[in-house]
Image (cartoon, coloured by chain):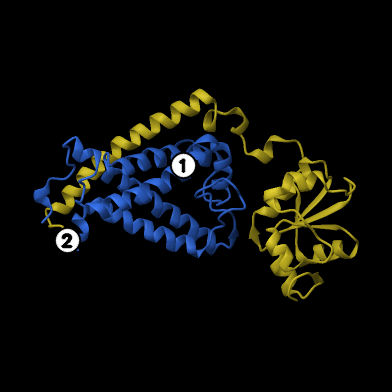
Amino acid sequence: MISASGTPEVFRSAAREAVFLLVISLLLGLSYNGITGKGIFGPQHRARPASTSNVQAPEIIPLERAQTLFASGAVFIDSRHAYDFELGHITGAFSIPLKSADEDIAALTVPRDRTLVVYCDGADCNSSLEIGSKLSLAGFTSVKIFFSGWQAWKQAGLETEGGRK
Amino acid sequence: MKTLLTHPWLNLLTRTVVGSIFIFSSVEKTADPGAFAVLLDNYRLLPYDFSLAVATVLPWVELVCGVAVLAGIAHRGASLILGVLTIGFTVAVVSGLLRGLDISCGCYTLDPEVGKIGWSKVVENTGLILLFVFLVYSTGTRWTFDRMLDRSTVPEEHIS
């Protein structure tokens, strides 16, 4: 057991070491990144990545709008993991998971002015935003983010395919 | 309890495990702080510029402390830092889960498809925190550089 008098001494000693290690880490981190021009010293990262381009940010749309676009033949892009896509997805959707996004977008044979609707799993997931930005940067001019995504679509009982229904 | 705290093999094993974990998880992040900043930004807890500042320094804290824990140099201080950091990571993960974020953890790799945040990560981090508490109190420091240099960080008389 640790004695009552020992506990504060353990912490005082550990705290002294911690301060020493933090100073060393700070010096190493700032020196390395300063020399190599990375992190806060990298001009390419001074601004948020998406804001560095002139491309307009994709519009975020609700379920009703997604339904309308689905009916009008918009191309749906599923940005979830390929495994989730196999379990079920919006009918006709293409799978573009983050991991292979660059190759999949390059291989996407869809006219650049066609409306694309990107979705991921739920209301607050990020992959749809990231894929949406990548599609915009790739030259697609009408990219929408269906933010409430797969969960909202499924709950509304709308058309799906693949996996267990 | 006393036996566990004074056991040198248990101390060495624990230091090897947690030290290796943090060295491994820091290497990729030190090489690409920009990508790490994007992963931190996904948590939507900090402004992007602050995430970038954290991403510039944090992997180095993990690396230095990981090496310190593994080698047994100022390892109690390193364990204290890594324990506090792990508590911070856990709070961020829980906050993300409660807000329904579907994001990658950014814990061990920068690959966005590896290691999504989940409650299993919270359990894993809790285990790590317990190991750090053990290392702060453990006196089984026979196989540490501190002991080799005869620089015991806590006087033995304080441990009864």
The yellow one among the chains is A
Q: Is residue A58 left or right of residue B28?
A: right
| Location of residue B78 by image quarter | top left
Residue B54 drawn at (x, y percent):
47, 40
Quadrant location, the C terminus of chain A: bottom right
The residue lying at 20 percent from left, 51 percent from top is B140
- Examine the rendered structure and indicate whether residue B44 appears above or below residue A65: above
> Which residue position holds label 2?
B2
Chain label for disc 2:
B
Q: Is residue B113 visible?
A: yes
Q: Which chain is blue?
A: B
The answer to whether residue A130 is visible is: no
Kind of residue at badge 1? Ser
The quarter of the image holding the N terminus of chain A is bottom left
Q: Which residue is mark 1?
A: B26
Residue type (three-letter) at the residue carrying disc 2: Lys
